[in-house]
Image: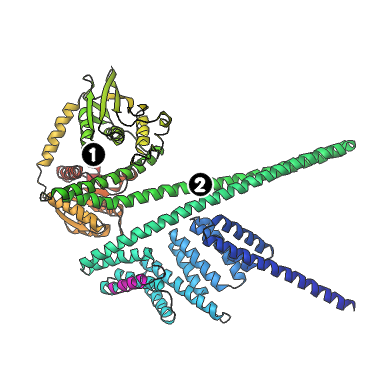
Amino acid sequence: MRTTSLICFLLFTTFLFANEDRKIIDKIDKMNGSAMEYYKKNKIVKSVNLFLEAKHLADSINDYYGFAIANYNLGKIHSKIENKSDAKAYFLRTLDASKKVDNDILIAKTYIQLANISKAEEATEEANEYLEKAIEYSEIKNYHTEVDKDKLNFLSIAAGTYLCDLLVDTDQLEKGLINLLKVKKLLEVNTPNLRTKGFFKYIYANYFFKKGLYNAAKANYEEAIALVEGDKHKINVELLSKVFKNASLNYYKVEEPEKAYAALLKYDTYKSQFLNTTKLEHDNIIKSKYLLEDYKSDAEKANIERLQQVEVANRLKRGNNVAILMLVLLLVSIIIISYGYLTKRRLSKALRARNTELEITKNEALKSSELKSKFISNVTHELRTPLYGVVGITSILLQNNDLKEQDRKHLNSLKYSGDYLLNLINDILQIGQIEANKVKLKKTSVNLEQLFKNIINSFESRLNETNNNIRLTIDEEVPKHIKCDKVRLSQIIFNLAGNSIKFTYNGTIDLRIKLLDVKGRRANLTFEVEDNGAGIPKSKFKTIFDNFSQLEDSNVNYQGTGLGLAITKNLINLFGSKIHIESEIGKGTKFSFTINFEIDSSAHIEKRVKQEEARHLIETNKNYKILIVEDNKINQIVTKSLLEKQDYQCVVVQNGKEALEEVRANKYDLVLMDINMPIMNGNEATEIIRSFNTTLPIIALTAADIEEVKDNYLEIGYNDIIIKPFDNYEFFQTINTQIQKSQLSSGVDFTKAS
């Protein structure tokens, strides 16, 4: 009887505990589901918070499946916001928990996610291993249901396709073919979506292209395009941009230039769509990171307040204990001393933990800042490339003497717009360089009068539009030549004069150079830019020099980014001076600053020498042979047209690898080398050329910002750099100079001679 009662009691107790665990598991599943809904609605903080709660709750009752699901989704979130290390840690925890419950679907999905991270980190071998593991776990086993079998078939196709892409991309062609055939069999017995089929055809085409089977590659590229564009649910513009880019190269190989050009135009279209989508996704990533940082910050504040409350409670408790236990003073003393020691240890440990958390938060903030700088650099580089085509082709068309006056006017407007965009890009880059202390002043001989006249001439069109005129006044005692950074001084005057023209109509802008004093070989010069335009309110005097600051007037449309005056102020500070402003509403504005310059008394001698050198270069026979290394079709057309109009012979190749073959096989007088190219970039090609030819002039012709490459271009092997878009005169002057140096050196190591 007692035994039976005990057994019944144990069974009843077990049932109660099992029922309680079931309720907790249901709660975990609901929390994971709700968190996923928040994630889909891009409510990242709420999603992360719920997944963390579900993870901790699942861990407390050893619910491995719930624990695995929470970790898997946390990994996806951190992967999305580019926290690769945290994402990898969550996915590894997912694997551990999934294997305990033999969930092959979740294991295969997790291995695919890990492979994506490894591929992004360029750990190719590790990515291969993860994908092979994903394929292994996606094999059908006896205990799988029909629904599970369908999911595993899809995962097997996905993992196999990614593996094929990785193998072909890393030139493991034989192994890649074996896996391509395996995936092909799976596709024949399953019905995946059009995007998956198109992606497979794209990889197969890449395999044939690398094997030199261009007709087979052509057929597969065209099938891939038809499949992906036929996906009415959602067209994958990233995949299409890749397919059209490679298809263009393949059409070139099978000598179908019209199709190659059409494919290249399609590539540009889809790439632009992809960049727009990527920008939106990047903005969401940055926003999510900031939201998570705010969440962490709020959590830390709450924890600090809780600790403070605990500390206050502890102090009260110690005071009460002392009052109650006064009669046993010795015992109380021992208790207080022991408690104080333990409390200090506990607080010290908590402080160390908080310091560690703060250090992690600081590092994450630095990563976010670096990501922003890299994004701006990439975007401005991508903008410079098409601008080169716009400005270059416009300049070529303007050289045609048969243009109608209306057409010439339209082309001049187009070129003005292109130059305006280029100046905007340069302003964005320069403000970042100034803030990072990367701008250094140079000293060259400058003719002040000629410099100011050139600046005034550049405003001719704008002055006509606004019906303004500019007056230049220079004191007779002002030295004719000084030594300074010509580019930076020009930019200061250009920005201030441009600002005055923008706010003045039917008026006059005065440019003045005044001599304050001369001490030895140095002169203090004051520069003034004064207009009789709209004027600036005194309340705005401090803010107009801030980044992106503009005057707000609903009745006037003032174009601009708000960077001009901010850059001007910083450049004047670099010269060791300060800018001053005087203004009155309706009467005009005057900007002024004073700089101490070194007087250049030998400038007239150097000028004669330079004139002789320039005359010698102009008289030189230009029938030289130049190799153009450029992957962008439009840029090829622009550069080749410019050179052929000046009687240069040109040969165009697509990448650094083809450039090496041309330099080895033929004689060239100069190479114009783009830096960013597929297959082999310009830096790699130049270093290899220098290993067997040290005298051939090589000029880097690139859209990259010069500040990023000028420090090490000589070490790479370049003789000079030309930034796209460029001034045509400077372009030909640089080319002629390098060819002349090469001929005069006649066998001297060119990299050392330069």
Say few, some or many: other residues with alpha carbon within 10 Å of mark 2 (under 14 / 14 to 19 / 20 or more). Answer: some
What predominant SS class does the magenta segment belong to?
Answer: helix
**On screen, residue 738 above or below 226:** above
Q: Which mark is residue 504?
A: none
Residue 228 magenta: yes
Q: Are marks 1 and 2 in contact (CB under 8 Å)?
A: no
In this picture, which residue range is highlighted in magenta? 218-234
Viewer-closest of 22 and 370 = 22
The image quarter in which residue 90 lies: bottom right
Q: How far across and how far down the image is residue 14, in percent?
A: 77, 72
Q: Name the amino acid type tagged 1.
A: Glu
Q: Is residue 539 left or right of residue 440?
A: right
On-image quarter of the N terminus = bottom right
Q: How far across and how far down the image is residue 47, in percent?
A: 57, 59
Q: Secondary structure at mark 2?
A: helix
The image quarter in which residue 727 lies: top left
Q: Looking at the image, which residue is at 23% across and 23% down?
A: 474
Q: Name the amino acid type tagged 2.
A: Ala
**On screen, residue 603 above or below 346:** above
In this rendering, the label closer to the viewer, 1 or 2:
1
Viewer-closest of 395 and 114 = 395
> Label 1 vs label 2: CA separation?
47 Å
Q: Which mark is residue 465?
A: 1
Q: Which mark is residue 365?
A: 2
Q: Secondary structure at mark 1?
A: helix
**Tally of numbered tags:** 2
Q: How far across and how far down the image is residue 28, in percent?
A: 64, 65
